[in-house]
Amino acid sequence: SQQGEEDPQALSIQEGENATMNCSYKTSINNLQWYRQNSGRGLVHLILIRSNEREKHSGRLRVTLDTSKKSSSLLITASRAADTASYFCAYMNSGYSTLTFGKGTMLLVSP
Amino acid sequence: DGGITQSPKYLFRKEGQNVTLSCEQNLNHDAMYWYRQDPGQGLRLIYYSQIVNDFQKGDIAEGYSVSREKKESFPLTVTSAQKNPTAFYLCASRREGLAGGGTYNEQFFGPGTRLTVL
């Protein structure tokens, strides 16, 4: 399977600013998910958006999905230093039961 | 890290040795997964199992083996045939079901095992 691509690879912002990460993929998908990973730890599921959805919110997170462009974006509003982590998109191909992960975006939020 | 445990947290292996990484879950999930993470590479799927006594190769299964004798356990063996085993290994299980007119199937991850070959 081909990995998704996240953009940018790294992002450095100040507390209070918004952070936007993008993800592109190459196949038809069933759903797309975003995960967070603190350094040296396991991944934590943040949000799932189905292929028939265009936008989803969860707290300070907003995810959009454009299946015509095969892309998704994750917006973190009013960022905090505790948001510093790597963020991965992962998509489930239609008809499969596995996730394909992107290479991730490293987010650094400075106080 | 949910109800998934991995042990040990750090593992050192000499070249030519087989080692087994443990993964246990108490979430009553049917599906379990093993991933390898290298710097800048994201996660790559090694093996997965959708039900007890059944498992499938992922994208990078060569040099690895698994078993699924119990629902709660999915151990991964890194064999001497794996040429570059130094990496961070992550185990996950999948929650699957129906809600709000659709399905949900996010994965829950363990804390990982960092394997270093000396």
Image (cartoon, coloured by chain):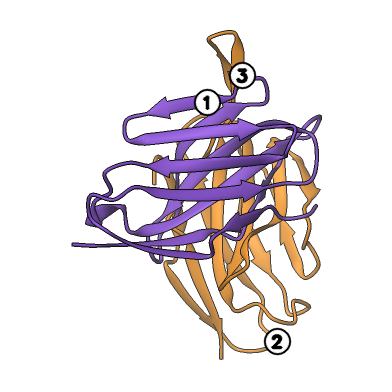
Chain colours: A purple, B orange
Residue with the mark numbered 2: B16
- Identify which residue, B97 or B113, lies in the foreground: B97
Instruction: Give the residue type at disc 2.
Output: Gly
- The chain identifier of the residue carrying mark 1 reads A
Residue B106, visible in the rendered structure: yes
- The chain identifier of the residue carrying mark 2 reads B
The reply to whether discs 2 and 3 touch (Cβ–Cβ < 8 Å) is no
Question: CA separation, marks 2 and 3?
Answer: 44 Å
Residue B30 % position (x, y): 62, 31
For marks 2 and 3, give the one nearer the viewer. Answer: 3
Instruction: Give the residue type at disc 1.
Output: Glu
Q: Which mark is residue B107?
A: none
Question: CA separation, marks 1 and 2?
Answer: 50 Å
For marks 1 and 3, give the one nearer the viewer. Answer: 1
Helix, strand or loop status at disc 3: strand
Instruction: Give the residue type at disc 3.
Output: Thr
